Structure formats: structure tokens, C-alpha cells
Amino acid sequence: MAVVLFFLGISSGVFCVVFGIYEKLVNSVLNLFKDFKKNFLFLLPIGLGGITGVFLIGKILNFLFESFPMPTSFCFIGLICGCIPILFKQANQKKGFRLHYSIFLLAAFGVGLLSIQLENILPSLIQVDSNNISFFYYVLAGFAMSIGIVVPGVSSTVILMCLGVYSHYLNAVATVNLAILFPMGIGVLLGSILFLKIIQYLLSKYYSQTFYAIIGFVLGSIFVLYPGIEFTGQGILSILLFVICFCIGLTFEKLDHSR
């Protein structure tokens, strides 16, 4: 699922937040060897789910988005919207609500909306000849790409477009071009460790402010998915699926007793 959502410009971190595992995921990755058994057992099903998503669910979702883009998009939008009340509850659980927290939400939301516009105009503005890209430039691209992987709602697609390597990356994935994927993988690994540590620090020192910013990014991601609405049979179905998935999202807190 994460692979398809990445191609759509959606950060997989958004769904880690929606499913209530983001903070625990950050801590488990950074503290893997401090309590290896506990952290490994937590990360194992997530890793297996990611692999399954790449080889199985990703193909199914790709088919659904191509064949039924409106109903499928509204399913995900409903799921995200249904989880928003839970996210606010998480954000306020330590110190309660403060009015100035909304500034962080609005700023992050604005960045999310800006990224949508950039995604539409960058391909025509920035083009880079793949023959002139060095090994270290791909490492830098992977390093920057890790921001979109780690920070919920920040699009890796836009970051790679800004660097002019998005199309090269897609071609490399399709053809398993290790000359591109290997240096980018190095950059992603280094960047992920750094930005995970930054997120961990921010959550430990400025939990509510950071979480409100994350909510802003999550809200911004909704507009990446929004395909427009037509009041046809498919449009009515889309609204119905939105309501169903919204209700499912509202039940997540009851299903997760660890919160």
C-alpha cells in the first residue's frame, strides 16, 4: 500500500499516524538494540506488511486507483477523516489544548497544500539529464527523500521532483536499476536515522506542538487524494464509501487498547 500511496504523493507516515503506531515506530527503530526482542517483535509484522503491500496489496490498490479512482480515493479520505478526532485526543493527552498550538497545525497544513501545487508544476520546470547525475547526487536525493518517509504528510514525490530525479527514480524501480537505487538507498538510510532522531527529540520536548504539526500535514494529505466529485452513480457510491470508512476510522481508538 505504501508504494502505491507514494506514487500518488501520499506519505506512508500519514497512515502510521492514522493507525496510532507512529510514535512507537520511531522509538522502536531508534532503540532497536536496547530492547531487541520487544522492538523486533513490534517491527516484524510492520515489515512483513510492507513486503506484502509491495508484492500483493500494492497491485490491488493500483488496479483500484486506475479503474475506480473516485470511490477508492474517497475510501482513504474517509478513513483519514475518521481518525482525526483520535489524533487530536493524542495531541492533547499530555498538556491539554493551547490556542497557539493551532499555529503549528495551520503552518503544516499550508506546507501540505503548497506541496500539491508544486507537484503539478515542478515536472515542467525541473528536468535533469540522468547521464549527468553523479553517485553522490543520488545519495543526496535519497537523503532528502527520507524526509518524506519519516515526516507524515511530507511528500517524497515533491522532494524528488524538486531535485529533478523523480522520473529517474520511477524508472529505476521499474527496471531494478541498482546504479540509481543503491546510492539513493544509502541516502535514505542515513537520512531516516537523522530525521527519526529529530522527530523523537521534538516529540519528547515539544509533544503537543509536534503532534499538531503532524495533524496539519495529515489534513493536507487529504487534498492530494481528493479527485473531485460527480453526482453520478459512482459519485453516490464514493460518498457512501466515505461515510463507511469514516465510521471505521472512528472505531480505531476502541480497537487499540494500547492508547
Image (tube, rainbow, N blue to C red):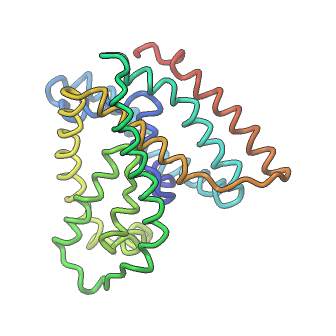
Q: Is residue 80 left or right of residue 35?
A: right
Q: Residue at x 49, y 46 (%)?
A: 53
- Seen as rendered, the residue at the extreme right is 233
38 vs 154, nearest the viewer:
154
For the C terminus, the image quarter is: top left
Which residue: 30% across, 16% down?
95
Horizontal and vertical percent for residue 3?
A: 46, 54
213 vs 248: above or below: below
Examine the image and state in which quarter residue 230 appears.
bottom right
Q: Is residue 51 above or below residue 104?
A: below
Q: Going by the image, does 49 lie left or right of 238?
A: left
Q: Residue at x 41, y 73 (%)?
A: 122
At 57% from the left and 35% from the top, the residue drawn is 81
Instruction: Indicate the quadrant where residue 17 lies.
Output: top left
- x, y percent for residue 158: 39, 62
Whole-percent x and y of residue 123? 43, 75
